[in-house]
Amino acid sequence: MTHLSTSDNGADRVEHRWATVSVVILVLLVVVATFAALYHGAIPQSRVETVDPRTLHLGGEFIESNLGSAVEPDGAVTVRAIGQQYSFTPSCIVVPTDTPVTFRATSADVVHGFLIDGTNINLMLVPGYVSSLGARFDTPGERLMPCHEFCSVGHEGMWGRIKIVEKAAFARMAAERRRPSCVE
Ligand code: CUA
């Protein structure tokens, strides 16, 4: 009898210890999530922007003549793009180095992915919603922009390009064209 009760106590102790470990892990996760939300402003629910995917081509910020890179009054750049089966518009995006760039994109049909190879820029384009992300590019170059959400039979062939050019070269392009892009 004594023997059995000792082993029972041992199991109890181990169980308590594991319970403590899991509570500590839970508390840590809550602390990390709270820190991310407050310090990094990661509160997506408060920033949802909607747009009607059926009327993108008729008016508003995603009308075709407004797509591409726009220079804001403060010198920052806003890039607007649309994903649709099976391409991006514009298919080649041009951005300057050393400038705050905001990507604003949406989908005209199904869910697509918007990813710039070799960077941490990665968005989902969901019909009805505007996806937005700020970025900054240090070095000029060219990168691929593959769709990374399966969007039906043409998915494999859906990709665009992004050209990062020197700030001065971009300013020259912006002087010639209202919405610079590198579509040939
Ligand atoms: Cu669009 Cu996959």
Image (tube, helix red, strand yellow):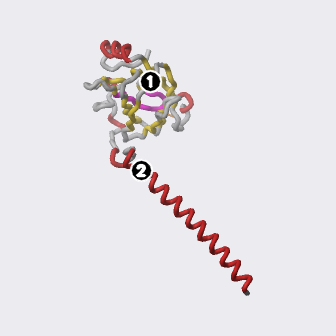
x 36%, y 18%: residue: 180
What secondary structure prevails in the magenta region? Answer: strand
Span shown in magenta = 78-88
Secondary structure at numbered mark 2: helix
x 39%, y 29%: residue: 81
The image quadrant that residue 17 belongs to is bottom right
Q: Which mark is residue 138?
A: 1
Asked whether the beta carbons under mark 2 and mark 1 sit within 8 Å of each other, the answer is no
Circle nearer the N terminus (2, 1): 2
Give the left or right position of residue 124, taking residue 61 as reference.
right
Secondary structure at numbered mark 1: loop
Q: Which of the image's four quarters has the N terminus?
A: bottom right
Query: Crowdedness of circle 2 by 10 Å Cα count: few (<14), some, many (20+)?
Result: few
Q: Which residue is mark 2?
A: 35
Instruction: Residue 29: give x, y in percent of width and height.
Output: 49, 55
x 40%, y 40%: residue: 127
Q: Nearer the viewer, residue 184 or 120?
A: 120
Kindly report the distance in space between the C-alpha atoms of the residues bearing marks 2 and 1: 28 Å
Can residue 44 be seen here? Answer: no
Query: As displayed, is residue 137 above or below residue 150?
Result: above
Query: As displayed, is residue 164 above or below residue 107?
Result: above
Q: Could you tell me the amino acid type at mark 1? A: Asp
